[in-house]
Image (cartoon, rainbow, N blue to C red):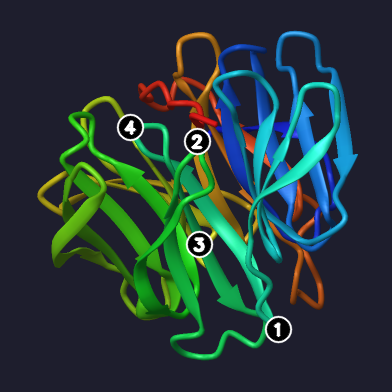
Amino acid sequence: MTAYEVAVHAQATLGEGPTWDPATGRLIWLDILGRRVHTYDPSSGRRTVRTTEQHVGAAKPRAGGGLVLNLRDGVGLLDPDGSFGWLHHEPVPGRRANDAAVAPDGSLWAGTMRYDEATGGGTLSRLTGDGAAETILPDVTVSNGTGWSPDGRLLYYADTPTRCVDVFDHDGDGIRNRRTLAEIEEGAGFPDGLTVDAEGCVWVALWDGGAVRRYTPSGDLDRVLTLPAPRTTACAFGGPDLTDLYVTTARAGLSAPHPLSGSVLVVPDAGKGLPQPAFAG
């Protein structure tokens, strides 16, 4: 078992989306099905929680303060004063938001999926600060981990049921030349959220795998962090030097969840993360 600490004892139904906010020195994370956006300050231990009106798939810092939220019916903006407004409102019956990430240019790449996880029922879309939305990938099943190489020229992406972490060439706002970086073998879990470190390696949390794996840019597996909660959902580097790896976990669907299922775990000095851009809107 990897040497880990419990950052936040919690019982989140579907803990997800850890994101380090350097402006506040806090970790943002959420409970998708619990409709809650949490923050955690590791220097003081202070925690906050905000309830959203809808299931929330992602919450990312905005350049001017506040958050951009990937919600069931679209993408919204939460201002620092707590006021909310839709940036892009597109409700689709039976569909909800899932993971999202901010690209190097400040755009939001937001994923969706169907509640019943029907094949091809989700999408990956790119949204800019003026509300313009473009579908990048149609016919996705469970849109999950999304991240960019240090130079921004590669996009890494996981559609969970495929068991694959894929890589695309990325130029500006477009992607092409899809190929497989890594395939998760039967019995090892499914690729969920991911992050890219300063060396260009991809760290991916494995749903039903109780682990986070690190793959090199050539697709070689070079490190495995084993953790006690079986449904590890996503990971992100945080802390003042971006060296601590925070990992969210879930209790959803478990008849006898581990005592730490739904908590946020942290592996100190796991590596070196990349500063994440804020949403330009």
Question: Which badge, 1 or 2, is on the more N-terminal residue?
Answer: 1
Q: CA distance from mark 4 to mark 1?
A: 31 Å
Left or right? Give the position of 9 relative to 95: right
Q: CA distance from mark 2 to mark 4?
A: 16 Å
The amino acid on which the numbered mark 2 sits, given as a three-letter code, is Ala
Residue at 46 percent of width and 18 percent of height: 242
**Image quadrant containing the C terminus:** top right
Residue at 65 percent of width and 78 percent of height: 92
Q: Quadrant of residue 98?
A: bottom right
Q: Quadrant of residue 37?
A: top right
Q: CA distance from mark 3 to mark 2?
A: 18 Å
Q: Which residue is mark 2?
A: 236
Q: Locate residue 106, reporting x and y percent.
A: 41, 32
Q: Is residue 190 visible?
A: no
Question: 241 or 155, which lies in front?
Answer: 155
Q: Locate residue 253, reporting x and y percent.
A: 74, 76
- Mark closer to the observer (1, 2): 1
Question: Which badge, 2 or 4, is on the more N-terminal residue?
Answer: 4
Q: Which residue is mark 3?
A: 111
Question: 166 or 241, which lies in front?
Answer: 166
Q: CA distance from mark 3 to mark 4?
A: 17 Å
Q: CA distance from mark 1 to mark 2?
A: 31 Å
Question: Which badge, 3 or 4, is on the more N-terminal residue?
Answer: 4
Question: Which badge, 4 or 1, is on the more N-terminal residue?
Answer: 1
Question: Which badge, 3 or 1, is on the more N-terminal residue?
Answer: 1
Question: Which badge, 3 or 2, is on the more N-terminal residue?
Answer: 3
Q: Which mark is residue 104?
A: 4
Q: Which residue is mark 1?
A: 93
The amino acid on which the numbered mark 3 sits, given as a three-letter code, is Gly
